[in-house]
Amino acid sequence: MPDLSRRRLLTGAGIVVGAGAAAAAGAGLVRQAQPAPVEADALGGAIPFHGAHQAGIATPVQDRLYFAAFDLSTDSREKVVAMLQAWTAAAVRLTAAQEVGGGATGAEPAPPDDTGEAIGLPASRLTLTVGFGPSFFDKLKLPGPERLKELPHFPADKLDPARSGGDVCVQACADDPQVAVHAVRNLVRIGFGTVSVRWSQLGFGKTSSTTPDAQTPRNLMGFKDGTNNIAGTDRKKLDEHVWVGDEGPEWMRGGSYLVARRIRMHIETWDRTSLKEQEDIFGRTKREGAPYGGTREHDPVVLDRMPIDSHVRLASPASLSGATILRRGYSFTDGSDGLGRLDAGLFFLAYQRDPEKGFIPIQRALAATDPLNEYIQHVGSGVFACPGGVRPGSFWGQGLLD
Ligand SMILES: C=CC1=C(C)c2cc3[nH]c(cc4nc(cc5[nH]c(cc1n2)c(C)c5CCC(=O)O)C(CCC(=O)O)=C4C)c(C)c3C=C
Ligand SMILES: [Fe+2]
């Protein structure tokens, strides 16, 4: 649990102190209709919303994801500003396990402000991260950052427009799916008339880690995923590869560019593949996750010990003039496809300082020769500029829209 003092929580997360709070302590930081004082030892895993960077990027990866991409239903900047102000106020409360607006009860005869399904649940390390797609800037006639461009087409892409694009995105990560869904649902509600959901994706079983000391999670192919990811504590690498710096624009400083890809896995075909072939495809062993030529997971990757077209060799920065991304993906299963096959795969999320030096060269190399392509297909895609962190009293995208 993060070591947050009560004072820091109260100022940082914007919680208003009120009566009737004693009951909130005990089982963690608990949602209350009435604003409540919160004990320092009862934060229930609240991650501060405010800071130099948006939470949910370098933050230790939570267990669950709910990601939503929105279309603007207006070209009025004023309406968008009003919505982003209201979203920010709600996000401050949601990430601190507080109900939005006037709460989930007591508003008769009006419908309650908060939908209520998170009453009594702790903060669950909820983070809410917002990004703007290239079309956001076109629709609002705003100058977009130079580095935010539509992604190129990659060979074998089979992108479904109904699962791609979006003017705005919200990435909600939490250890409890109900908390993540509740957060996005309430933002959708607040945004009614200004944005509508274009597509969304639930994710479970994180497939990457930003905490190298923790056990590396496994993807649905059974392999450890995230071994060679950037650690959330590695400030040097984050500054070099993830956070936007002086190249700006100003409102993007401390922000990052997000690439989201819905990657379907042909699980049934994969499961009929021998262990040796599976391991050759990645260039790592299945049980230990060791790179070929090594015996332990974190042994150094020696490229020429790996098959020349193995996934890890192709994607390694050493093969691609240093191209590096921060991965933050999740597994998904969305039922079956009507032909008896699971609609399952990896919802791949990658943050970087410049997609031209991160995702794009890596994906070009993978799309060309990765043997994994026989077992996967990219079916959804989005690219978003995620502004720098929100300061207390400010709102998401303020520097851009003010
Ligand atoms: C464009 C970027 C990448 C896509 C798309 C991608 C898809 C993808 N990856 C796996 C499984 C694994 N990937 C691993 C390593 C790895 N993958 C990428 C990039 C993309 N992967 C990078 C940059 C790396 C790290 C390379 C390195 O520096 O060593 C691994 C090995 C363990 C690890 O380091 O994480 C696995 C396993 C799947 C299943 C998949 C699409 C469905
Ligand atoms: Fe990969």
Image (cartoon, helix red, strand yellow):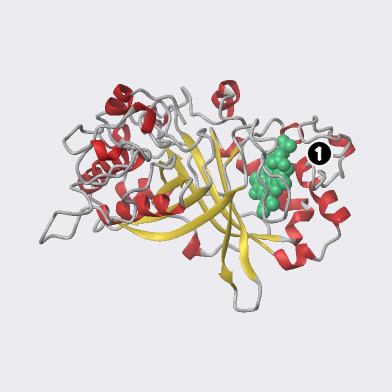
Drawn side of residue 228 relative to residue 55, left or right: right
Drawn side of residue 330 relative to residue 389, left or right: right
| Of the pair 321 and 343, the residue shown nearer to us | 343
Residue behind mark 1? 290
Please rate how many residues cluster around mark 1, counting C-alpha atoms within 10 Å: few if below 14, some from 14 to 19, many from 20: many
Amino acid type, callout 1: Ala
* Above or below, comparing residue 209 to residue 342 in the picture: above
Q: What residue sits 61% from the left and 38% below the top?
A: 209
User: Residue 14, image x and y in percent?
Assistant: 26, 32
For residue 84, what is the image quadrant? top left
Q: Secondary structure at mark 1?
A: loop
| Of the pair 290 and 388, the residue shown nearer to us | 290
Could one spot residue 275 in this view of the protein? yes
| Of the pair 147 and 242, the residue shown nearer to us | 242
User: Residue 324, image x and y in percent?
Assistant: 64, 34
Q: Quadrant of the C terminus?
A: top left
| Of the pair 399 and 86, the residue shown nearer to us | 86
